[in-house]
């Protein structure tokens, strides 16, 4: 039991804005009308809006600590098919509800606490048809949905530092947890820890500048990750993930290195790219407001040279990882990953292993394995940036 703070401390906490805690939630109603209620420790502002394809309702909140029990978090009822919650940006949290079909947000508000009730977030949803739904979202939601379109921060100048910049991109984050291991391990945590290890080793070599698309548990849209690397003139972009197979799709093990291609190299690569490309949908980002520079990048001619460099690096990663980690039986694959779309930055996506495979998960959780695999990646980065003998192509600077 946490000790009750005394009256003075409580008064002080109120002045300095106590953190917002969401302690419990309830869903009531049926397929026509559904009410979604979250208990809060104090009143806050919210913005709610709906998105199509797939149908979702997004509730944007100030930063909230979610303390739902596992049972509370698994509820589904009426129009609510599933929901998730978490950080969407520094200072901002989000709840995303997958709905059974098109819905109308009838009410979205926060009630003050009363004598016997905590403050409550109340969301009332009503079933509607697709035409009315689409009409409503174009009219009503413009102002509410700006949150995810976080402006790109101004990249730090290299200050004349001639060392190449390696951008590490730990997948997922915040509300988007990625895949899940049998012990409740989350992909977003595993890949962040790995990226931090790799960053330490790359910086330790003294040969590279390193930047990370995220260094905490925050959600970053896929296009933002691409923009991050481009804006900084990165010499190399390494996206880090850990895959999982659906329960009935057999076993697979080991690391796989992916590059970008318009046609997937095989069915598994296609499935994986589709899953990874869903990150924005999972977090409730409205893709209709995305600038189309990223969407049209595939036709860019500069991409051809970049693709060659990406392939070279991917092959080197496979060669180096071979000695340090288990590899998938087909360790080099390609598919249409959105996060690899930078036309001018050689980019690969490394799936470290399978969260759904016991032995892989054990490795993913091991500091020794992490250090060894990161070392292999550093060697691959070294090979990539080391000028080759004239005539052999070689890496980039
Ligand atoms: Zn992933």
Image (cartoon, rainbow, N blue to C red):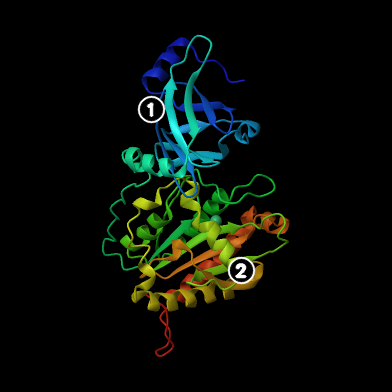
Q: In which quarter of the image is residue 264?
A: bottom right
Name the residue tied to disc 2.
267
Label 2's element?
helix
The residue sitting at 40% across, 44% down in the picture is: 134
Mark with earlier residue (2, 1): 1
- The answer to whether residue 30 is left or right of residue 152 is right
Q: Which residue lies furthest to the bottom in this view?
A: 391
Q: Distance between the residues labelled 2 and 1?
A: 45 Å
On residue 45, the disc is: 1
Q: Quadrant of residue 246?
A: bottom right
Q: In which quarter of the image is residue 75?
A: top right
- The answer to whether residue 194 is left or right of residue 93 is right
Residue closer to the observer: 319 or 271: 271
Q: In which quarter of the image is the N terminus?
A: top right
The residue sitting at 72% across, 55% down in the picture is: 358
Residue closer to the observer: 56 or 20: 56
- The answer to whether residue 134 is left or right of residue 174 is left
Examine the rendered structure and indicate whether residue 338 appears above or below residue 66.
below
Q: Position of residue 185 (x, y in %)?
A: 63, 47
Q: Where is residue 250 in the image (x, y as percent from the top left)?
A: 73, 61
Q: Position of residue 289 (x, y in %)?
A: 34, 51
For residue 374, say whether it is visible: no
Residue closer to the observer: 311 or 394: 311
Label 1's element?
loop
Q: Is mark 1 within 8 Å of ligand 1?
A: no
Q: Position of residue 193 (x, y in %)?
A: 54, 52
The residue sitting at 54% across, 64% down in the picture is: 350
Within the displayed image, which quadrant is ligand 1 positioned in? bottom right
């Amino acid at each position: 039991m946490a000790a009750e703070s005394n009256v003075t401390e409580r008064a002080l906490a109120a002045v300095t804005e106590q953190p917002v805690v969401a302690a419990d939630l309830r869903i009531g109603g049926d397929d026509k009308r559904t009410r979604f209620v979250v208990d809060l420790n104090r009143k806050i502002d919210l913005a709610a809006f709906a998105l199509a394809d797939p149908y979702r309702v997004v509730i944007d909140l100030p930063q909230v600590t979610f303390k739902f029990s596992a049972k509370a978090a698994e509820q589904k009822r009426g129009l609510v098919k599933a929901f998730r919650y978490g950080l969407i940006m520094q200072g901002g949290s989000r709840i995303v509800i997958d709905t059974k079909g098109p819905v109308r947000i009838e009410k979205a508000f926060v009630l003050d606490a009363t004598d016997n009730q905590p403050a409550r977030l109340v969301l009332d949803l009503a079933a509607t048809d697709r035409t009315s739904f689409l009409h409503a979202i174009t009219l009503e939601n413009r102002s509410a949905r700006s949150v995810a379109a976080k402006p790109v921060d101004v990249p730090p100048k290299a200050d004349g530092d001639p060392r190449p910049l390696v951008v590490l991109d730990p997948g997922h984050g915040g509300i988007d947890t990625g895949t899940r291991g049998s012990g409740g391990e989350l992909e977003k945590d595993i890949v962040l820890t790995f990226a931090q290890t790799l960053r330490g080793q790359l910086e330790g070599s003294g040969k590279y500048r390193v930047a990370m698309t995220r260094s905490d548990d925050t959600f970053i849209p896929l296009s933002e990750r691409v923009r991050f690397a481009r804006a900084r003139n990165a010499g190399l972009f390494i996206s880090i993930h850990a895959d999982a197979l659906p329960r009935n799709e057999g076993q697979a093990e080991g690391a796989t290195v992916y590059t970008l291609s318009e046609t997937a190299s095989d069915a598994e690569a296609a499935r994986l790219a589709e899953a990874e490309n869903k990150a924005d949908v999972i977090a409730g980002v409205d893709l209709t407001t995305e600038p189309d520079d990223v969407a049209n990048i595939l036709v860019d001619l500069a991409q051809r040279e970049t693709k060659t460099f990406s392939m070279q690096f991917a092959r080197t990663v496979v060669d180096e990882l071979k000695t340090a980690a288990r590899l998938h039986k087909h360790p080099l694959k390609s598919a249409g990953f959105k996060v690899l779309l930078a036309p001018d930055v050689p980019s690969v996506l490394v799936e470290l292993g399978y969260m759904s495979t016991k032995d892989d998960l054990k490795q993913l959780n091991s500091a020794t394995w992490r250090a060894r695999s990161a070392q292999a990646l550093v060697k691959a980065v070294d090979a990539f940036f080391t000028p080759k003998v004239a005539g052999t192509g070689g890496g980039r600077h």
